Amino acid sequence: MANLFPARARINPHFAEPDLIVTYAQASGAFEALQGGKPRVKIGQDDLYVYVNSLDLRTEAQASGAAPNFLPSATLAGDQFSTATYLVRTRSVWDRHDIAAAANYNVSLPAAQGLAARQGHYQQYRTSLLYGYQPSNGEGLLNAPAATQVTLPPDPYGNTTFSTYDNGAMALWLLTQIVNLKIGMYQSGGKIHNKIVVISPQRIFLQAQIANIVQVTAYQRPGAGTSTTANVAQENLAAAGDDLVWFFDDTLQGKGSGGSDAVILTIPEIEVPDIPGINTNVFGETSPSMKAVNVQYASMAAPIEIPTPTEDGAITTVYENRISSGWNVRGAGLYILNIPH
């Protein structure tokens, strides 16, 4: 690391603009795949693993005209799942000479170094959320072993890439995947209203949201001539009582099968299927139960800062936080769409 603020020559008289031209990075929407849009701050700074218990049941009952002598009973089976955690650390170092040099550029060096360190941490969180540190162990949402992998099929005209695909056909295909997602999670019924999240590269998101207007044909199509691919999907889901929200992360470019773009389709939080009266899912009322579909754990909401003076008069600040990789705990709630661009 370095603090590079070289001396400069300037012509007088002059005007010095006080505002900085700052290098920006993409603000990733990947964390919207998590319940509440953020990691679960529950683990300790030294916890090396996270364990989650599960409870499965198989119910049996017998019906007969006379009272039977041997009765079946329900089978309850507990299981345990786990994922590793990782300590993310970085540091910044400066002395009074660095602070003075940075001030000549209208930069508060301690504040800038602190924000830079946080950005490094948050980018690490995003990487671990999507890809994990040990993919072979199923870490990261894209490596979730129980997730459903779907590859974009040819459209009615034989096109196989997003940039050439028929816009109306793309909207219908996306809606079909959402229907399959809801069916697999039993998320049907009048009381269930889901937030459905799509995370894709910008070149998929922006094209679907802005440019891919459904083409006019010889027959009436939903949204033809006015609505885009994303508009058609969002309006149809809104009419059904659901919300479709689209976010982007460009690291997903080329991360799908065969070099295609990976698009995450998920319902971050499951709703317990429930109906009044006789409820064939009454066991779902068992508590405590986790509603999250995808989780990531952290020991703190933001990295802790540990400043320490050095013997040469400088200050070093260590930033650290312990996190887990992204963890899909309900495979039915996560689809990975492989879409060639």
Image (cartoon, rainbow, N blue to C red):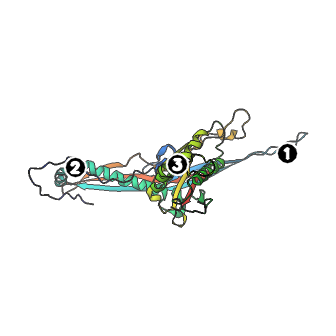
Measure the C-alpha gap from mark 2 to mark 1: 80 Å
Q: Residues within 10 Å of mark 1 (few under 14, many from 20)?
A: few
**Residue 234: horizontal and vertical position, in percent?**
55, 44
Whether pointer 1 and pointer 3 mark residues with C-beta atoms closer than 8 Å, the reply is no
Where disc 3 sits, the SS reads loop
**Residue type beneath disc 3:** Thr
* Furthest-right residue in this view: 66
89 relative to 9 in the view: left or right: right
**Residue type beneath disc 2:** Val
Measure the C-alpha gap from mark 1 to mark 3: 62 Å
From the image, state whether disc 2 or disc 3 is nearer to you: 3
Q: Residues within 10 Å of mark 3 (few under 14, many from 20)?
A: many
- Residue 70's label in the rendered image is 1
72 relative to 23 in the view: left or right: right
Residue plotted at (59% across, 40% down): 288
Whether pointer 2 and pointer 1 mark residues with C-beta atoms closer than 8 Å, the reply is no
Query: Which residue matches tag 3?
Result: 228
**Residue 42: horizontal and vertical position, in percent?**
47, 45
Query: Which residue matches tag 2?
Result: 107
Where disc 2 sits, the SS reads loop
* Furthest-front residue in this view: 218
Closer to the camera, 133 or 127?
Answer: 127
**Residue type beneath disc 1:** Phe
Closer to the camera, 329 or 315?
Answer: 329
Whether residue 126 is visible, yes or no, is yes
- Residue 286's label in the rendered image is none
Q: Earlier in the sequence, mark 2 or mark 1?
A: 1
**Residue 33: horizontal and vertical position, in percent?**
51, 49
Measure the C-alpha gap from mark 2 to mark 3: 44 Å
